[in-house]
Amino acid sequence: MNKRAVSLISCLLVIVFGLVILASCIPPALTAAEVEDGIYSQVNKLRQDTGLTALTRDPNLDGLARQLSASELSKGEEEATELHYLLHNSWWVSYTGGSPKLVEGTAQEQVEYCFKNNDLREAMLRSEARATGVGVAIVGSKVYYTQVFDILNAASGNGEPIRLSENAQASDVSWEQVKEFVMQDDTNAHLYILDSFVCADFAALLHNRAEAAGIKTAYVSVDFSEGPAHALNAFNTVDRGLVYIDCTGQGFQTPTFGDSSDGQDIYGEYDKVAYLVVGRVYGLIALDKAASFDYGFYEQWMQQWEDYEAKVDLYNHGSLTYKERQVLRNQIEALRAILGDYRWEPLGIVTRVNIHW
């Protein structure tokens, strides 16, 4: 190899090495999904730094956010989707030096921008927000960033928005702890008064009291195939899973007594376990009688009530021998020991359940 060739090869090596060094100084490109993940993580960190609960990532909200970003934050797109029910903030960055790029610092740049804006900062730090979705879309020479927050869209009896208080230290507890708390709490002793104190007020009050007591609680809204929506609570117990509690008090619904007597309402028994399955009726069982939280248990419970009432009717009006009456009476008393003195009529057919942790 002659001297000229060695010199040429040496120059090429220097040029290639220089290009490698230059490339190492350019931040690596990221996908839109990676930037979305970064925004989600950083917003949650900001919330936790201020004592708020971290938001869960909802794929449905991600889809809405991406849809809005891809539409270039179109008002028409917002009004045509569920977005008009959600608090959302949006922002974008324009690139003039060629194609827009998503790089390592992009997520931080956008979150810092939002945090410096009063309205957007308030959106990120809404205490009642429970879930979020993030969407990033490149359209032409711009990148559109959207984050949507699922907030409670409910009003109290007097028309004011429902506000939920949260405790960052609240945690899931056992069913017995939930049961003890609910039985000692007097939320159910309030009267249901239309245009004053309605189911949303009961659910919000129990939620805020449970959170203050260190028990993680959800506000739940339920839509029916007919009639107005309803509100209740949920607890994700560590030993029995998800349990729905309806503490709506006297004035909304009265119990039905199985022996056809006109018995009196029992104070404190308006605490109920609720059974929710989309497409089925909204079932209720008194708190102290709910041995299981599966919908199948509720169906069996109602079947037992039908059997009980049929036996009571037969005992009162049937033509029976003395022995048959004694046998039937024993069966009635056995069922009554299981079922109690009264039952709650089911509400409408459930079409949608929204859980706000």
Image (tube, helix red, strand yellow):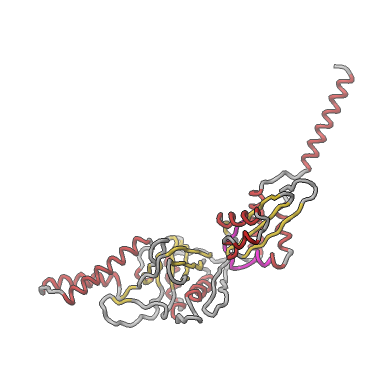
Q: Does the magenta stretch include residue 128?
A: yes
Residue at 50% from the left image edge and 64% from the top image edge: 354
Give the image location of residue 254, x and y in percent: 37, 78
Looking at the picture, tell me which residue is in the foreground, 282 or 327.
282
The N terminus: image quadrant? top right
Identify which residue is drawn at 37% across, 70% down: 346
Estimate the x, y position of residue 55 in percent, counting from the top left. Answer: 59, 60
Horizontally, residue 21 falls left or right of residue 189, namely right
User: Can I make out residue 263 in this image?
Assistant: yes
- Residue at (88, 24) in percent of width and height: 7
User: Residue 310, located in which quarter of the rendered image?
Assistant: bottom left
Residue 261 image point, x, y percent: 27, 81
Residue placed furthest toward the top: 1
> Residue 158 lies in what quarter of the image?
bottom right
In the image, is residue 200 above or below residue 13? below
Query: Nearest the camera: 172 or 300?
Result: 300
Instruction: Tell me: 113 left or right of 203.
Output: right
Where does residue 230 sit, x and y in percent of width and height? 46, 71
Residue 162, image quadrant: bottom right
Q: In this view, does 47 lie above or below 17?
A: below
| Residue 103 within the magenta-colored segment of the rendering | no
Considering every residue shown, the one lying at the far front of the view is: 76
Between 319 and 335, which is closer to the camera in this rendering? 319
The magenta region covers 121-133
Residue at image point 18% right, 74% down: 315
